[in-house]
Image (cartoon, rainbow, N blue to C red):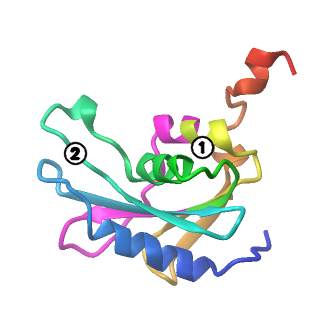
Amino acid sequence: MEETFDLKKLILQAMGARTKAYCPYSNYQVGAALLSSQGRVYPGCNLENASYGATVCAERVAFFRAVQEGEREFRAIAIVGGRKDQKIDSYAYPCGICRQVMKEFCGDDFLIIVAKSLEDYKVMTLGELLPHGFGGEQLSGA
């Protein structure tokens, strides 16, 4: 899989977004950096709420920011997550709701990068992470 963008720079931006997470209940900070087809990066961090149902993941914050700015086409997202003030020791894969939001705006070739560090990361496509996803094409009969 060949990227035509600076993958490590995108991971670094996700790491920066992670530091802004509001997570007083779980202490699990997540940062995301969403790359639009136009080359603009939209950061996002998780925002917890005492009513857990009102919590919003970093990935969706990034998508919502981008869509609010008029973006509708995306190339990749980098995601970094882990316990606050601890070394990141696992990959933070997007939850099912975030995968569904990605499906709304992205094709199966959209890249998802999960990282522990600038040297330790995995790259996969949305099609690999959400096979047989449900999207607008099912509703339009296309």
**Residue ID for mark 2:** 48
Q: Is residue 86 left or right of residue 140?
A: left
| Residue 127 picture quarter | top right
Image position of 112 with respect to 127: above or below: below
Image position of 47 with respect to 80: above or below: above
Image position of 28 with respect to 1: above or below: above
Q: Which residues are magenta?
A: 78-100
Quarter of the N terminus within the rendering: bottom right
Q: Residue at x 70, y 37 (%)?
A: 131
Depth check: give the residue in front, 9 or 63. Answer: 63
Residue farthest along the right direction in this orientation: 142
Query: How many callouts does the rendering have?
Result: 2
Q: Is residue 25 left or right of residue 4?
A: left
Quarter of the C terminus within the rendering: top right
Residue 64: percent from the left, percent from the top?
A: 48, 46
Instruction: Based on the picture, tell me whether residue 8 belongs to the magenta stretch.
Output: no
Secondary structure at numbered mark 1: helix
Image position of 141 with respect to 129: above or below: above
Secondary structure at numbered mark 2: loop
Residue 90: percent from the left, percent from the top?
A: 39, 64
Residue 35: percent from the left, percent from the top?
A: 61, 64
Other-residue count near label 1 (Cα within 10 Å), few / some / many at <14 / 14–19 / ≥20: many
Depth check: give the residue in front, 68 or 141. Answer: 68
Q: Report the disc number at residue 102.
A: 1
Q: Is residue 140 left or right of residue 48?
A: right
How far separated are the C-alphas under marks 1 and 2? 20 Å
Q: Residue at x 45, y 46 (%)?
A: 60
Q: What is the three-letter code of the residue carrying label 1? A: Met
Q: Which tag, 1 or 2, sits closer to the chain's start?
A: 2
Q: Residue at x 45, y 75 (%)?
A: 13
Residue 97: percent from the left, percent from the top?
A: 47, 35
Q: What is the three-letter code of the residue carrying label 2? A: Glu
